[in-house]
Image (cartoon, rainbow, N blue to C red):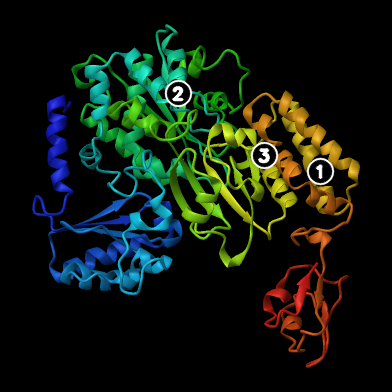
Amino acid sequence: MALTTVQLDDLRTHALAQMTPGRSGLAMRIVVGYATCGIAAGAKAVIESLRKELAVLGIDDVAVEETGCIGMCQYEPLVEVFAPDQPKITYVQMNAEKTARMVHSHVANGKVVAEYTIGAATGEAAQGEVLPLDSTAFYKKQQRVALRNCGVIDPERIEQYIARDGYQALKKALTELQPADVIQILKDSGLRGRGGGGFPTGLKWSFTAANAADQKYVVCNADEGDPGAFMDRSVLEGDPHAVVEAMTICGYATGASEGYVYVRAEYPIAVKHLETAIEQATALGLLGDDIFGSGFGFRLHIRLGAGAFVCGEETALMTSIEGKRGEPRPRPPYPAVKGLFGKPTTENNVETFANIPQIILHGARNFAATGTEKSKGTKVFALGGKITNTGLVEIPMGTTLREIIEDIGGGIPGGKKFKAAQTGGPSGGCIPESMIDTPIDYDNLTAIGSMMGSGGLIVMDEDNCMVDIARFFLDFTVDESCGKCSPCRIGTKRMMEILDKITAGKAVMEDLDKLEELAYHIKENSLCGLGQSAPNPVLATLRAFRDEYVAHVRDKRCPAGVCKALLNYYVIADKCRGCTACARACPVGAIRGKVKEVHDIDTDKCIKCGACMATCRFGAIEKR
């Protein structure tokens, strides 16, 4: 059945009623976070308990549904309850037993179990008080555009996407706008590519549209490879139709009739939901021939990546789709001229596409009202590391790093001091504490030697060694280099060898100069973005934390006590009680001493595992 525009509107009205408590016989709607994070935390047992207890009580007017990532990952499994004329109630860290109690108390008798709710978990609510999720510090400063449906709809039910104005933007584009009008709206919106480069989206689309060809393509880059990044995965798991709709709009605007989503095979739930979305859209005539009777047709395919980080680079990605080894191509020619299968191609990442329907539906001015002068809209970040609140956040461009860390993130746990934040993954740079008030947007991050990247944001505290952090990210890029060009293939390996010398206490001061010289040579001469950005973590930490490098080289000391070759464990005599717990915990017998006598550590035998320090109850062991 191919939907007409009238039928789409009728389906929207009907679907909205079906998912709104108090209408169509629905007394209550309960959703369970069933993305990767929720399932890993035990969401399956929660949803089974929900359905079992409802059946036991004979309640058949409550809908139980699976949804995408709600956002607060450390509080999974998450359950949200929607009831008529009542605020949404968010239950956290649920299990089968808690769920059973919640059903009997809240669902059956209208009594919210306050101690299971989000406010109680974060400590923001008084005892017995129920705090709405949107009122928590984690959510108050967020503004959801790309994530607007994640955690709200069942991603495998197209009618719920349609109920939330899904495919209305496609209808508007095909029935009210010319292709050039669509592109102009995107230009006026100021949307920049969310994959890291920040290139103006409307301008990119116009380049493809300007090239005549018998075949053009649209490509979605869902090959999310940055350590700690899960933004694209969450969108595909929670709102796959937004990407399907946006790619179809792109096809119309640029003259393309086929699209490919290149997604990591390590994202099975995202792949499954995307496959379902394509099947459902095709069945309703929202993909295929003559969509809405416009004469425009578009088809969508999925290609699975095998986990090569370099395939996040657009030309390597297209080479991989073609069935060849994923290696970057020299540019020019650019993909808009010669891309996939040698034809003009438009490529954007998942988050970029997720913004498109809202821009077309509500207009460029509405989107551009958020953000900064040169960076419009919002940005999704995967917030992780040494931070109280971890999870998925979407903030207006221009929000400061301090607001993200202290307000949304809840600060550094354990009373530790903030040291740095890594943005942009292995291609990005570290933002030190002195720059914590930097507004987050493309140009500000570039100006301080970092970059937006796709959206990973890793927070570090005083216990992190910045030399070790740089080594970690460079080790990743060395392993992921495709090997096509020698600056990246050989140069990053030589940089890694110098970092190994530094962390082992075997480097000399001249090695720091060699490290910096190599870094700039690789940036200037590598073929693709992976090699050009690989030295960024090293350069950023050299610039902001050079004193730590000097301490490793000149003083043979790791200030953070991380690099094992540069530290030893010692017993503090006036704190030792001679309890022998440390000696019993030592796997190599390196601790000497009798009961009730001060112990001693043989540094020659010690393997620096830290078991003694972790075991001591008196704080009598230190590392230095």
Query: Which of label 2 and label 3 is nearer to you?
Result: 2
**Position of 242 relative to 319 (above/below):** below
The span from disc 1 to disc 2 (Cα, nearest Å) is 39 Å
The kind of residue tagged 2 is Thr
Which residue sits furthest top? 212
The image's mark for residue 477 is 3
The kind of residue tagged 1 is Glu
Question: Label 2 neighbourhood size at 10 Å, few (<14), some (14-19), many (20+)?
Answer: many
The answer to whether mark 1 and mark 3 are in CB contact below 8 A is: no
First in sequence, mark 2 or 3: give its number: 2
The x, y position of residue 169, in whole percent, is: 27, 27
Residue that mark 1 sits on: 497
The kind of residue tagged 3 is Thr
Q: Residue at x 15, y 32 (%)?
A: 9
Total numbered labels: 3
First in sequence, mark 1 or 3: give its number: 3
- What kind of element bears circle 3? helix
Write down the quadrant of residue 517 in the picture.
top right
Q: Quadrant of the N terminus?
A: top left
Question: Label 3 neighbourhood size at 10 Å, few (<14), some (14-19), many (20+)?
Answer: many
Residue that mark 2 sits on: 201
Q: Residue at x 73, y 51 (%)?
A: 468
**Residue 256 seen in this snapshot:** no
Q: Is residue 279 left or right of residue 379?
A: left
Write down the quadrant of residue 187 in the picture.
top left
The span from disc 2 to disc 3 (Cα, nearest Å) is 27 Å
The answer to whether mark 1 and mark 2 are in CB contact below 8 A is: no
Judge by depth and name the residue closer to the eye, 458 or 10.
Answer: 458
Q: Quadrant of the C terminus?
A: bottom right
Which residue sits furthest bottom? 596
